[in-house]
């Protein structure tokens, strides 16, 4: 038959007595071994002489449905190294909070990985502030031992960290985080403040020039700061502009061109807004019969929309994974001819910018990668922020991101 001494092990202490109190809590009284050295809780040096002792009560892991307290006498003495009176170091006491055992603190930190601080605190009957400190200190301790893993293919994207300014004169870029993801492991490996060039520079500087040279592919959007940083630290890597961001820019140009066509024709203006605008952006094969009949009728009335439809359909074929760089260039040349014949300024501007970035766009057909994994993680980060009703501490928010979709959690911690 098991007893509490067999279920629990407290280094340097023995169970003197245990019982269930009138308040429904199990109380375990511990007695200190005399041969245990008195170590300073702050600096780790031995305290030569004990001056006093006091009764300490610590929350421990619940036993079945009963909440459990550890009660013991803690020694105190003058530390020669600190030049102050310090309490002794207790082996089973949590480093994050003096009111919790290390086993209980670890269990609470595991709980914070799957739910919010508030919900975990209500479930365990622990103060919100105490649980927040436990989680924050646990994450900082893990981060101090964290080493960015070796990577060869990464994805870089930004995510909005806060909507309100943290300090006077804060720019829009400072309200974002730069998130670096390993494409192969599908894990976030780094989070930096802001979306400026310096944010990505920080990542490359931390891994060093030798590991930067091992990176062969970087996927990102068209942010100029990221381009400069990648060119400076990873000139040998193929920088791939994300096709989803490029398609979004194209769809905006198509939408503006549609408005331009109806404006110059001065007819059927009801089709220039409302629910009709989404029909023009749909792929022909995905339209319903009703939408298909509508498009055919409109194109019969307005021949310029035929060019718009051809350009849009050809762009959907452009990023086909089976295309070679030569085939993609042929498609672009064909689209360029149609855009010239259509004469819509929005599409002309889009084409000019698209051709300017051709050197980076064509890399997609060699590497076949996108920053879609980063876009998916952005949704996870936004959900994390909504569940917590926002974060006031940005350092804690970054650590929570790396805990949720990175390596700062109990599954990977040593």
Image: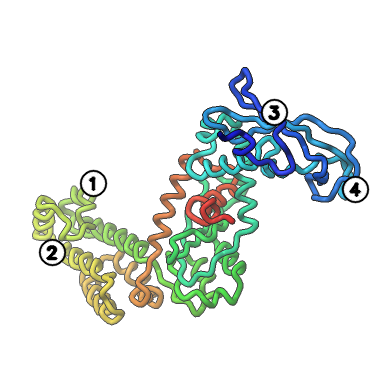
In contact (CB < 8 Å): disc 1 and disc 4? no
User: Residue 316's spot in the image, x, y percent?
Assistant: 24, 66
Q: Point out the image quarter for the C terminus.
A: bottom right
Alpha-carbon distance for marks 2 and 1? 21 Å
Alpha-carbon distance for marks 1 and 4? 77 Å
The answer to whether 13 is drawn above or below residue 147 in the figure is above
Q: Earlier in the sequence, mark 2 or mark 1?
A: 1
In contact (CB < 8 Å): disc 4 and disc 3? no
Is residue 176 visible in the rendered image? The answer is no
User: Residue 241's spot in the image, x, y percent?
Assistant: 40, 69
Q: Report the side of 8 relative to 359 (left or right).
A: right
Mark seen at residue 58: none
The answer to whether 314 is drawn above or below residue 236 in the figure is above
Q: Quadrant of residue 344?
A: bottom left
In contact (CB < 8 Å): disc 3 and disc 2? no
Alpha-carbon distance for marks 4 and 3? 35 Å
Q: Can you identify the residue that label 1 sits on? A: 274
Is residue 17 visible in the rendered image? The answer is yes
Q: Secondary structure at mark 3?
A: strand
Q: Can you identify the residue that label 2 sits on? A: 303
Q: Can you identify the residue that label 3 sits on? A: 17
Q: Earlier in the sequence, mark 1 or mark 3?
A: 3
User: Crowding at label 3, few (<14), some or many (≥20) Cα neighbours within 10 Å?
Assistant: few
User: Residue 353's spot in the image, x, y percent?
Assistant: 37, 70
User: Crowding at label 2, few (<14), some or many (≥20) Cα neighbours within 10 Å?
Assistant: few
In contact (CB < 8 Å): disc 1 and disc 3? no
Q: Report the side of 399 relative to 335 (left or right).
A: right
User: Crowding at label 1, few (<14), some or many (≥20) Cα neighbours within 10 Å?
Assistant: few
Mark seen at residue 80: 4
């Amino acid at each position: 038959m098991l007893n509490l001494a067999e279920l629990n092990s407290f280094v340097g202490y023995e169970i003197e007595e245990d019982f269930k109190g009138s308040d429904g809590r199990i109380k375990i009284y511990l007695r200190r071994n005399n041969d245990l050295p008195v170590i300073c809780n702050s600096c780790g040096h031995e305290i030569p002489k004990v001056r006093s002792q006091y009764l300490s009560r610590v929350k421990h892991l619940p036993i079945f449905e009963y909440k459990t307290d550890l009660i013991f006498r803690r020694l105190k003495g003058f530390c020669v190294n600190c030049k102050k009176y310090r309490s002794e170091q207790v082996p089973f006491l949590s480093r994050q909070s003096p009111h919790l055992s290390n086993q209980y603190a670890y269990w609470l930190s595991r709980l914070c990985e799957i739910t919010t601080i508030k919900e975990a605190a209500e479930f365990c009957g622990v103060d919100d502030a105490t649980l927040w400190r436990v989680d924050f200190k646990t994450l900082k301790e893990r981060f101090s031992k964290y080493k960015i893993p070796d990577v060869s293919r990464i994805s870089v994207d930004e995510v909005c960290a806060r909507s309100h300014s943290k300090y006077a004169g804060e720019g829009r870029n400072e309200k974002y985080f730069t998130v670096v993801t390993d494409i192969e492991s599908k894990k976030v490996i780094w989070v930096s403040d802001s979306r400026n060039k310096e944010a990505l520079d920080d990542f490359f500087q931390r891994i060093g020039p030798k590991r930067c040279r091992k990176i062969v592919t970087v996927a990102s959007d068209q942010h100029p700061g990221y381009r400069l940083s990648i060119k400076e630290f990873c000139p040998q890597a193929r920088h791939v502009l994300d096709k989803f961001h490029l398609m979004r820019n194209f769809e905006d140009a198509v939408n503006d061109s549609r408005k331009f066509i109806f404006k110059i024709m001065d007819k059927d203006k009801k089709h220039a807004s409302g629910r009709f605008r989404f029909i023009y952006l749909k792929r022909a094969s995905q339209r319903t019969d009703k939408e298909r009949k509508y498009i055919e009728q409109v194109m019969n009335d307005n021949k310029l929309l035929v060019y718009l439809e051809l350009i849009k359909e050809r762009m959907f074929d452009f990023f086909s994974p089976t295309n070679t760089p030569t085939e993609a260039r042929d498609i672009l040349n064909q689209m360029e001819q149609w855009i010239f014949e259509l004469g819509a300024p929005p599409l002309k501007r889009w084409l000019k910018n698209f051709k300017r970035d051709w050197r980076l766009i064509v890399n997609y057909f060699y590497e076949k990668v996108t920053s879609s994994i980063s876009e998916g993680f952005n949704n996870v980060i936004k959900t994390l922020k909504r569940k917590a009703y926002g974060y006031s501490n940005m350092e804690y928010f970054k650590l929570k991101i790396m805990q949720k979709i990175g390596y700062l959690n109990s599954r990977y911690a040593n």
